[in-house]
Amino acid sequence: MAPGIFVRKIGMTHIFDENGTNIPVTLVQAEECQISQIKTSKTDGYNAIQVAYGQTKSSKLSKPILGHLEKAGLPSFRSFGEFAVSDPTQYNLADPIDLNSFEIGQTVKVTGNSIGKGFTGNQKRHNFSRGPMTHGSKNHRLPGSIGAGSTPSRVYPGKKMAGQLGFKTTTIGNSTILYIDNDEKILALKGSLPGKEKNILKVIKKG
């Protein structure tokens, strides 16, 4: 039984349950995944399996990665990820990972990068209030004072100011599988998931 799989986000839609309740779901499509390395506590200090995904041309890969894939008997994959396992002896190199080990109603944990929004100001980044718009005020979206005067003569670290927003590793702890299509390799997961369309997500079984 595979502990998880890497999927590509398709987009959001909604479905109806037997009671007619409208449920928002995110559709994801499973990537072509194969086990590229088996790690044990004796050799690596922990038990895990390394999974290769995202097939590409061999000309786009470095020689060390090509050698690593050749040792496992795999075609050209550009990306790798790991899943913690309790008994790595149950797995073999080059074993495929598909949706057959998932079930409808199963709870999973989903990890991925949130949507990046670039360099943003105080109001958008930290949900700050704006300044007055009338009575001669010219401070509409400015940050205002950011520190004290002569003492301490500096701005304390961690001050909430403008900066990069989004594109952070985000985890959804509880998402339920509501639909599985093994032919098209599609999963329907309840609720919204991190990132935009075509974003790679890591789906991990819970329990």
Image (cartoon, rainbow, N blue to C red):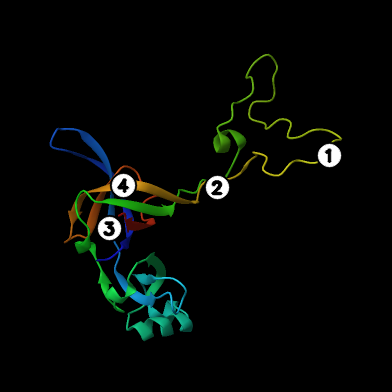
**In the image, residue 177 above or below residue 34:** above
Residue 69 image offset from top left, x and y in percent: 38, 81
Label 1 CA crowd tier, 10 Å (few <14, some 14–19, many 20+): few
* Residue marked by disc 3: 29
Q: Helix, strand or loop at disc 2?
A: loop
Q: Amino acid at mark 1?
A: Ser
Q: Helix, strand or loop at disc 3?
A: strand
Res. 95 image quadrant: bottom left
Asked whether, in this view, residue 196 is left or right of residue 159, the answer is: left
- Is residue 45 or residue 13 the one in the foreground? 45
**Residue 118 tag number:** 2
Label 2 CA crowd tier, 10 Å (few <14, some 14–19, many 20+): few
Label 1 – label 2 distance at C-alpha:
30 Å
Label 2 – label 4 distance at C-alpha:
28 Å
Whether tag 3 and tag 1 are in contact, CB under 8 A, the answer is: no
Of badges 3 and 1, nearer the viewer stands: 1
* Residue marked by disc 1: 153
Q: Residue at x 87, y 35 (%)?
A: 150
The quadrant of the picture occupied by the N terminus is bottom left
**In the image, residue 104 above or below residue 43:** above
Of badges 4 and 1, nearer the viewer stands: 4
* Residue marked by disc 4: 175
Residue 137 image offset from top left, x and y in percent: 69, 20
Of badges 1 and 2, nearer the viewer stands: 1
- Sooner in the amino-acid sequence: mark 3 or mark 1: 3
